[in-house]
Image: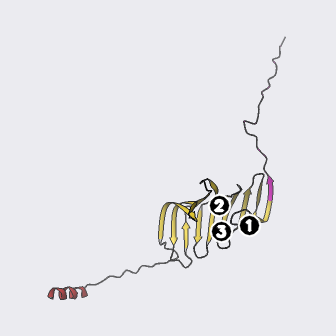
Amino acid sequence: MLLFLGTILSCEDETKDVVDVKFDPNTTYTMKATDVVSLISDSGVTRYRLKAKDWLVYGKAEDPYWYFPEGIYVEKFDTLFNTDASIKADTAYYYDKRGLWELVGNVEIESLQGERFETSQLFWDQKKEQIYSSRYIRIEQEDKIVTGIGFESNQNMTQYKIFNSQGIFPVEEKATPRDTLVVAVSDSTKRIG
């Protein structure tokens, strides 16, 4: 019993140092993952693959978000795991509560129809099922290239409109070396008499 009382009394004499740590939930991440490769399923079937060098989660921020500072690459698969569509960007943000993706820098999208979209900033509102941008957009189709400033689309990129069209440029089929026959013709040798 004396030993027990001695232990209690000795604990009362200890000093505890308190370190004041400033924690800003808007700028301090709550999770970090590196070299991420994640498969995402829909109704039990693998439909997407996400790749990112760094994935930071700011889960305690006022507006919780994910941050991909080194870029992101996402592929959509068909039932045989062939790539149907893809998205790539230099930097990405995902705002969890709003269901909003923001892709920044060299954004490239390959749509289900094989069209290629390029812009410097793109938003994907998952709740509204809408994709939009106010920046320059270049859309490469099979037979033409369409450019403009600002656009909006459904999330499948099948129905879209460009707000300030800058032009439509037809794409000519280029001849490949196999399609071209080069014939060299030489002058006949002249005889000097």
Q: Residue at x 61, y 56 (%)?
A: 79
Check contact, mark 2 vs mark 1: CB within 8 A: no
In the orientation shown, which residue stands out farthest toward the left?
Answer: 2
The three-letter amino acid code for the residue at tag 2 is Val
- Looking at the image, which is closer to me, 89 or 20? 89
Which residue is at the far right?
A: 193
Image quadrant in which the C terminus is located: top right
Name the disc covering residue 129, or none: none
- Image point 35% across, 82% down: which residue? 18
**Which residue is at a point 79% across and 61% down the rendered structure image?**
166
Rounded to the nearest angstrom, the CA distance separating label 3 from label 1 is 14 Å
Q: Is residue 125 left or right of residue 142?
A: left
Whether residues under marks 3 and 1 lie with C-beta atoms below 8 angstroms apart, the answer is no
Secondary structure at numbered mark 2 = strand
Q: Residues within 10 Å of mark 1 (few under 14, many from 20)?
A: some
Q: Could you say which disc has been placed on residue 107 in the image?
A: 2
Quadrant of the image occupied by residue 84: bottom right
User: What's drawn in magenta, residue-wise?
Assistant: 167-193
Above or below residue 134? Residue 62 is below
* Badge 3 or badge 1: first in the primary sequence: 3
Task: Where is residue 127? Give x, y as percent.
Answer: 65, 73
Residue type, numbered disc 1: Gly
**Element class at badge 1:** strand
Spatial CA distance of label 3 from label 2 is: 12 Å
Location of mark 3 (residue)? 124
Residue 97 or residue 156, whichever sits in front: 156
Which circle marks residue 150 in the picture?
1
| First in residue order: circle 3 vs circle 2 | 2
Residue 126 placed where, x, y %? 64, 70
Magenta run includes residue 173: yes
In front: 96, or 45?
A: 45
